[in-house]
Structure formats: C-alpha cells, structure tokens
Amino acid sequence: MLRLPRFQYETPRETGHAVALLARYGQDALPVSGGTDLYANMKQGLFTPKVVVALGRIADLRFIRYDAAHGLRIGALTTLAELAGHETVRTRYRALALAAASISTPQLRSMGTAGGNICLDTRCFYYNQNADWREALGYCLKKDGEICRVATSSTRCLAVNSSDLAPALQAFDATVHIASPGGERLVKIADFYRDDGRHAATLEPGEIVTAFTIPAPPVQTRSAYRKLRLRDSFDFPLAGVAAVVQLDGDGICSEARVVLNAVGPRPIEILGARAALIGTRLEPDALANAAESAFAAGKPMENAATSLLYRKRMLRVFARRALGDLAFF
C-alpha cells in the first residue's frame, strides 16, 4: 500500500493568509483544494512537500455568480459537482457543464474543485508511476531525470494537460484570477499554460488561483464538449474537444472556437476549424472540414495507455461529434 509522506498541514481561512503561508515556506510548500490529484501524486513520490496549505476552509472562494452585464464568475473552490449541476452553467455554458460532469466519479466530483482541475499536474505513462518503477527506468525529464522518455531528443517535457475544464474555459475566453504576494493578477486561460510539461502552469511560488470569469455569451451561442477515454467514467481524457459557436439572426456562424486537450502540455485552439465554420450554417461539409483541421493540428505522442495512431484518428471522430452536437442543438 502506498502511503502519504509526513508533512505539516496548514488550514488558513482567508486568501491572504494562504498566500502568506505559501510565501513563507517557499519551495517547501504546496497548496491543496480537493486533494484528489495532489495526494495521489504524493503517494507515488512525485511531490514531497514539507508543508501542505489546505484551501478548503476559505469560504470566499466557493461560489457561482452570473449577471448579464459581467457574465459568469466561478470561485476556485467550487466543486465539480456544483459546476456540472448549476442551472445557469448548464444552459448558457453547456460545454463547461459537460466537461465538469465528465470528470472522474460522483464521489470525486464532490471533492474536486474547479481551481484544482485547471491546476492538474501534467500526465505521462513514464511519469505517473510509483517511485520504484521510475527508479528502475532511470527517471524522466519531468522528475529526477534528464531524458524525455517519450522523445529522447526533446528539450521539453511532453507530458499532457489532462484538465477537462481547461479546453472548455478557453473556448469561452475565460480569465483566471490569481492571488499573489503582490496582489491580484489576471491571466487569460489561453496564456495560463506553458508548452512544457515540467512547469505547465504560469503560477509562481506563493500564488493560488482564486476565481474564473467568463464573458456573458450572446443569445445564439452553442457549445459542446466530447471526451475520449478508456472507460465511460473515472478516466483522464485521452483527448478532449471543446467547441463554442455564435450564430447571427439568420443562423450563420459569426464566431467559433474549437480547442483540443490531452494532446500536449497545454490546450490547443484550432484556428483552421474556426475558419472552416465562420460564414456557414454548420452544414455537414463545414463540420467535416473543421474536424479535419483538428485532426491535422493535433499531434498526440506515445505517452498514454493507447497507441498514438488510435488517439490521432479519434481526434477527427470526436471533433466531428462535438461539432455535430452544435448543429443539432
């Protein structure tokens, strides 16, 4: 049985106190919200913080608010179950509700949080193993080693972003609110991630995600999310496709965003899909062309439980299914 290492446990009740604790302990501390990802990784020896700063008692970070002028605001400690079941999210931001509902199991969705999901550690077959397995391999570029086992000549880690919320938030042009020792800073979710699995998020030591804001969608906005995984529940995505389109009064697509995930260290917006959809009525040919753009742009690596070829082919299939959900909304 894998056990948690020993650590000091801090439970601040205010955001400022949490930031101060993280700043005080520096590299020895990590924040935790629901803990569904961090504690499992600690058991495998992937993280060994001396101090864990638990955010769960900060009541001000758990909310969902909407108004037509400012759009949707989601506290980072909002649970995935709350996000998936919220009526406004389900009706106005459907892809986000679908993404939240697709994560893990009902029990873990009641523990896992929105902020925790976008801060998930990147995943790779060669990394997400116990300490003995990784030592026998000789470790990898992401943890304790010097070689990326996926592509031995790569100078960056190719472990993938496996957040289901990230592509949906990016398709809705969300902004991430971050509390730091110097005050609050705002980052577009498209700029929140780096293209390197070792340090995938732009969070600096002492910073925590506090909220997300998403603009109010126009009336004729449609969205969808599709997820490829080994099983119909519990599993991380082998690929995720979020799509959001806006239609004008004549039913013509005036704006579109298609975002892929789990094919690289950060979500990828498919600009070719946007070009294929704008100006159309979402006819089958337009949807097929957009799905083909997703297929061409997505470049999965051999770092998951299934083959590269299978994941590559399924990008076209799942992009077409997500786009088809928009056409038959």
Image (spheres, grey):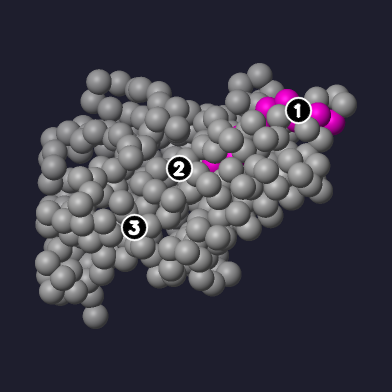
Other-residue count near label 1 (Cα within 10 Å), few / some / many at <14 / 14–19 / ≥20: some
The span shown in magenta is: 251-260
Circles 1, 3 touching at the beta carbon (< 8 Å):
no
Kindly report the distance in space between the C-alpha atoms of the residues bearing marks 1 and 3: 38 Å
Kindly report the distance in space between the C-alpha atoms of the residues bearing marks 2 and 1: 25 Å
Kindly report the distance in space between the C-alpha atoms of the residues bearing marks 2 and 3: 13 Å
Amino acid under disc 3? Arg
Q: Secondary structure at mark 1?
A: loop
Seen at 43% across and 68% down, the residue is: 307
Q: Is residue 93 magenta-colored?
A: no
Seen at 45% across and 27% down, the residue is: 188
Sequence order check: which comes first, mark 1 or mark 3? 3
Q: Which mark is residue 279?
A: 1
Q: Nearer the viewer, mark 2 or mark 1?
A: 1
Sequence order check: which comes first, mark 2 or mark 1? 2
Residue 155 lies left or right of residue 321; in this view the side is left
**Where the N terminus falls, by quadrant?**
bottom left
- Location of mark 2 (residue): 267
Seen at 12% across and 67% down, the residue is: 138
